Amino acid sequence: MGRSRYKIFEPTHPHFVTCTILHWLPIFTRKESVQIIIDCLKFLQQKDNLKIYAYVILENHLHMVVQSDDLPKTMESFKRYTANQILKLLKEGNVKTLLEQFKFYKKAHKIDKAYQIWEEGYQPKLMQSDAMMTSKIKYIHENPLKRGYVDEAVHWRYSSARDYNDIQGLIGVERFW
């Protein structure tokens, strides 16, 4: 996808990925925009056999450890669908400031679109060992903690930290790999 220098050579193996909103604009500050992400991930769990091992959604980016039958295809579907739905939400809400910024910061080579929501790529990193997997899951769960948003990782609603503490989260996750 896109012009990323990061490549996936093992498309069916778990990868740590990061998806960032263009210019780090804070789009996930409303539950409606986060719900777009959650609904899309749930759909891809059914459609593309997406396995989510960990996730966190913050105000302008998200981290996940994921796996599917064809991860590049799944990620392309995820970003395309969520971008369209986020644009629709912003237009329906007449959120002109963000729409203008998504138009202004759009990369010059994106001539087929009026707006760009996501930064290009998603920086995939292959999970090569249990230690690496554990480290990335810990990083994901501690992200809101490090930012000072919560005192405990399980308090962040949009994270799989709850699942790893036997509290049902918003998206089903695989805890064993």
Image: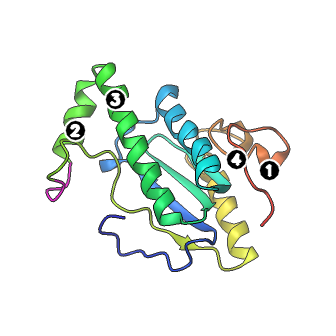
Tags 2 and 1 touching, CB below 8 Å: no
**Is 24 positioned to the left or the right of 40 in the image?**
left
Q: Which residue is mark 1?
A: 164
Q: Earlier in the sequence, mark 2 or mark 3?
A: 3
Q: Which residue is mark 2?
A: 101
Question: Of 73 and 91, which appears nearest the observer?
Answer: 73
* Main secondary structure along the magenta-highlighted residues: loop
Q: Which residue is mark 3?
A: 88
Sort mark 1 into few (<14), some (14-19) or many (20+) by Cα contacts within 10 Å: some
Tags 4 and 3 touching, CB below 8 Å: no
Position above or below: 91 against 49: above
Q: Earlier in the sequence, mark 4 or mark 3?
A: 3
Which amino acid is tagged 3? Lys
Sort mark 3 into few (<14), some (14-19) or many (20+) by Cα contacts within 10 Å: few
What is the distance, in whole Å, between disc 2 and disc 1 at their CAs?
37 Å
Please give the range of residues in magenta. 106-110
In the rendered image, residue 109 lying in the magenta stretch gets the answer yes
Query: The N terminus is located in which quarter?
Result: bottom left
Which label was assigned to residue 160? Answer: 4
**Quarter location, residue 125:** bottom right
- Number of the front mark, 4 or 3: 3
Q: Residue at x 50, y 57 (%)?
A: 74
